[in-house]
Image (cartoon, helix red, strand yellow):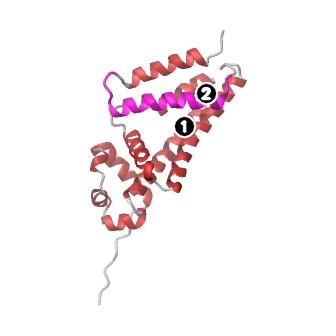
């Protein structure tokens, strides 16, 4: 009796990368377990064995994407130069590239589904947000200590700036008419100049 050779499953990172590519190329509505399975050579049942649910697949894909963004954010914030220039780089990385930006499309879907999510999933989403917040607080504190920024409460200012960025970013990601990426960046620059930059 001959045994059938089983095709090994692709590494999870390959599956997550494929999911992100599908969102970018076809939109989130086309990302089904069956379609993703065809893309990576696995059955939808096999995918469910690894991820248990589509909600878990989406959250893991978001965590994978955030890991890549976090590494890029770390490089931007560690480079030499003034805090203002690095704050501009942070904002530039934060704001979506445009309508249907795949990362933001996924982020919006995961947060929408989180209303009924288990505590573990909500904790993981909070960890994503916490990383962005901590990096911004550290950058603000550095700029304040160097006299580039006004002596604001870094934690409170970061919370307000991120709320502004989230609101504008959602407008960009969903393609709200009259709001585009360049307009958003201009609004944020003006807000920073009026509320954060130290006087001459």
The percent coordinates of residue 12 (x first, y second) are: 43, 60
Is residue 97 at least partly visible in the picture?
no
Q: Quadrant of the N terminus?
A: bottom left
Is the residue marked by circle 1 packed among few (<14), some (14-19), or many (20+) residues within 10 Å? some
Quarter placement of the C terminus: top right
Q: Is residue 128 left or right of residue 18?
A: right
Toward the viewer: 113 or 1?
113
Q: Which mark is residue 85?
A: none
Q: Is residue 54 magenta?
A: no
Residue 171 included in the magenta stretch of the image: yes
Residue 33: image quadrant is bottom left
Q: Residue at 46% across / 19% down in the picture? A: 187
24 vs 87: above or below: below
Q: Please name the predominant secondary structure of the magenta segment in the image.
A: helix
Percent of width and height locating residue 21: 34, 47
Q: Earlier in the sequence, mark 2 or mark 1?
A: 1
Residue 87 locus on image (x, y percent): 57, 27
Relative horizontal placement of residue 167, taking residue 158 as reference (left or right): left
Secondary structure of residue under mark 1: helix
In front: mark 2 or mark 1? 2
Residue under circle 2? 157
Figure check: 4 above or below 95: below
Q: Callout 2: helix, strand or loop?
A: helix
Q: Which residues are magenta?
A: 152-178
Q: Residue placed at 37% from the left, 57% from the top?
A: 54
Residue at point 70%, 19% (across, down) = 147
Furthest residue in direction right, as rendered = 145
> Marks 1 and 2: in contact by CB < 8 Å?
no
The residue that disc 1 covers is 73
Give x and y (percent) for residue 175. 32, 30
What's the CA distance linking mark 2 and mark 1?
A: 19 Å
Q: Report the residue at 38% width, 69% height from top.
A: 8
């Amino acid at each position: 009796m001959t045994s059938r050779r089983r095709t090994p499953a692709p590494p999870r990172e390959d599956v997550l990368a494929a999911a992100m590519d599908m969102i970018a190329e076809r939109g989130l509505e086309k990302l089904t377990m069956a379609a993703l399975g065809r893309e990576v050579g696995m059955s939808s049942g096999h995918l469910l064995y690894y991820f248990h649910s589509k909600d878990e697949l989406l959250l893991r894909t978001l965590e994978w994407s955030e890991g890549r963004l976090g590494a890029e954010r770390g490089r931007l914030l560690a480079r030499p130069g003034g805090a203002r220039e690095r704050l501009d780089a942070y904002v530039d990385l934060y704001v979506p590239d445009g309508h249907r930006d795949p990362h933001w499309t996924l982020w919006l879907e995961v947060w929408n589904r989180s209303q009924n999510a288990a505590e573990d999933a909500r904790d993981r989403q909070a960890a994503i947000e916490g990383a962005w917040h901590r990096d911004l607080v550290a950058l603000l504190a550095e700029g304040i200590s160097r006299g580039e920024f006004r002596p604001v409460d870094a934690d409170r200012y970061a919370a307000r700036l991120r709320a502004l960025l989230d609101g504008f970013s959602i407008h960009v990601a969903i393609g709200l008419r009259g709001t585009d990426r360049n307009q958003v960046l201009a609004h944020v620059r003006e807000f920073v100049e009026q509320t954060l930059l130290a006087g001459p």
